[in-house]
Amino acid sequence: MPVLATIGYGLAALGPSIAIGLIGGQNQNATARQPEIRGYLRVNMFLSIAFAEALGLLGFVAGFLFA
């Protein structure tokens, strides 16, 4: 059963890692288009990254609880 939990955590970490990459890339694109709102974009980027990481941590905890 521990092997199954390891696979589950690996899959749970895949989504947030892809999401963080997309968030960072889109933030760079938006900053290049409108550099004057760079501060607002940075705040929104960090909030989005925090929510994506929270989903990864939930998957990690669920692997321990349900395994």
Image (cartoon, rainbow, N blue to C red):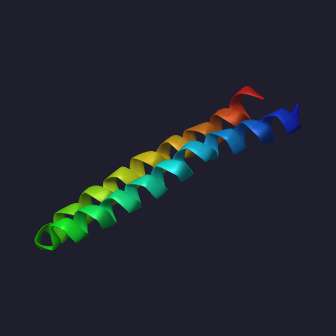
Q: Residue at point 56% right, 45% down? A: 56
Q: Which residue is at the front of the view, 5 or 45?
A: 45
Image quarter for residue 47? bottom left
| Residue 32 against residue 15 in the figure, above or below | below
Q: Position of residue 30 (x, y in %)?
A: 24, 62
| Residue 58 against residue 25 in the figure, above or below | above
One can see residue 39 in this view: no
Left or right: 38 in relation to 50: left
Left or right: 12 in relation to 40: right
Q: Which residue is at the front of the view, 25 or 19?
A: 25
Q: Residue furthest left?
A: 36
Quarter of the figure that contains the N terminus: top right
Q: Residue at point 73% right, 36% down? A: 8
Q: Residue at point 23% right, 68% down? A: 31
One can see residue 32 in this view: yes
Left or right: 7 in relation to 19: right
Say how many tags the image has.
Answer: 0
Q: Position of residue 11 (x, y in %)?
A: 68, 39
Quarter of the figure that contains the C terminus: top right
Q: Residue furthest top?
A: 66
Left or right: 60 in relation to 35: right
| Residue 20 against residue 8 in the figure, above or below | below
Q: Position of residue 17 (x, y in %)?
A: 55, 52
Q: Which residue is at the front of the view, 44 or 60?
A: 44
